[in-house]
Image (cartoon, grey):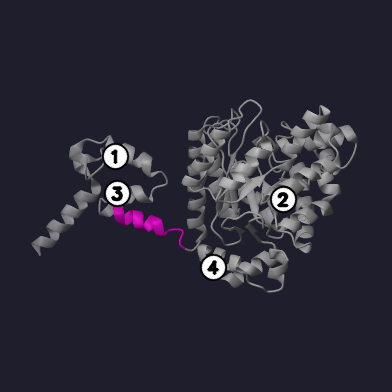
Amino acid sequence: MTRVELAKKGVITDEVKRCAERERTSPERLSKDIAEGVTVILRNINHDIEPVAVGRGLRTKVNANIGTSKDRMSLQDEMEKLDIIIKYGADTVMDLSTGGPIRDIRRLMLKSSPIPVGTVPIYEAAVRAAETHGSIVRMSVDELFQVIEEHGSEGVDFITVHSGLTLKAVEHLKEEGRILDIVSRGGAFLVEWMIYNEKENPLYEYYDRLLEIAYRYDMTLSLGDGLRPGCLADATDRAQIQELITLGELHQRALDAGVQSMIEGPGHVPLHQIETNIKIQKDLCKGAPFYVLGPLVTDIAMGYDHIAGAIGGALAAWAGADFLCYLTPSEHIRLPSLEDVKEGVIASKIAAHAADIAKGIPGAADKDLQMARFRKALDWEGQMRLSFDPEKVYRYRSEAPPQESEVCSMCGEFCAIKTVERALRSKSSKK
């Protein structure tokens, strides 16, 4: 039986108990939320990792993407990126490889990663079709589902599947007149296949077949937004909402079949539309976990998209998004470097943490209170230990003049904390 089926029967598993303890919630509540489809636990039955819960009332989770391209195929680089992702606290990792020995990369990542691993199977299916047939448009339905089956059997914990990208949605796209039609790579592959073959999206037409595979491995479906807006001007349009309506229906079908699913969201969204997007998704998809890319609040932050994404991510998570996909400084430019990955993870972790404080997630503000106490005591070791990047703080501190060991070089002898403490002590001594 799957997690959904056990939860519907009122069975509280050890896995649920472990997740509930980490999230500071009750196992009963967590199990109920899984049964209702508003929370998922990411772990394939064939992957020996600690499970991660994503959903209602839980700590906002952060995903980091890595993977090779046809132009850069260093397996060593991707494994070093995985180490960085784990070190700086990402909750999950996705392998988006489209070049080199893709299957070997995935297997090594599954073997090496202590956190859940996600993939986008259409990527590998497209690469295989190009190698075998010369183009993705000649990919057969069986070939696509063979790749999905392999990902499940090998232990992939969640997969992005663009099942809501239907022929009807493509018609909406044509009528809409977007500036950027489709920026989703998986969505683009499927639209090309659909138009060339004059057939419905196989991930929609054969959705029951997809559910059967996910059911076998208790693998979570991340229902992808192939029509996510790629610029602010295209945000919250009819095409995006039409796909979201379909995703809500597919989420319910998955729940009825005993399969966990979550919904993927935009994308590029102006600040004032983010809360609306979250509310629409939660209403149309009956509270399903929402996994958002950023969202980016401006289109012109190239080189700093991790900051634009963190701004949008903080607001989205505060409004109810459950899962943030990081962006790196190299988004829209190149494959990320090791430093890009680090900065991307930290930016999204800050966004998620800020939102959790605002949402009142149990324990979210504990470290902030402790940081304030360390600052009052001028305890630099404590402050470094609690920071998102202790090594960076230590490096900055090591550059300060020796005579300013107790304070920072910004204020020096005019440190506000020391000045007030001295004044209060002086006043007390006069009494």
> Looking at the rendered structure, which numbered label has been put on residue 25?
4
* Mark 2 → mark 1, Cα distance in angstroms: 47 Å
* Place of residue 222 in the rendered image (x, y in percent of width and height, measured from the top left): 69, 50
* 2 or 3: mark nearer the eye: 2
* Mark 4 → mark 1, Cα distance in angstroms: 38 Å
Question: What residue occupies the far top of the structure in this picture?
Answer: 71
Question: What residue occupies the far left of the structure in this picture?
Answer: 430
Give the residue type that dot 1 points to: Arg
Tell me the chief SS of the magenta region: helix
Position above or below: 285 against 14: above
> Looking at the rendered structure, which numbered label has been put on residue 304?
none
> Looking at the rendered structure, which numbered label has been put on residue 381?
3
Question: What residue occupies the far bottom of the structure in this picture?
Answer: 10
Q: Is residue 230 visible?
A: no
Q: Residue at x 33, y 54 (%)?
A: 372
* Quadrant in which the N terminus is drawn: bottom right
Give the residue type that dot 4 points to: Thr
Q: What residue range appears in magenta?
A: 363-374
Position above or below: 206 against 129: below
Q: Which residue does the numbered mark 2 point to in the structure image? A: 152
Q: Earlier in the sequence, mark 4 or mark 2?
A: 4
Position of residue 247 in the picture relative to residue 141 (left or right): left
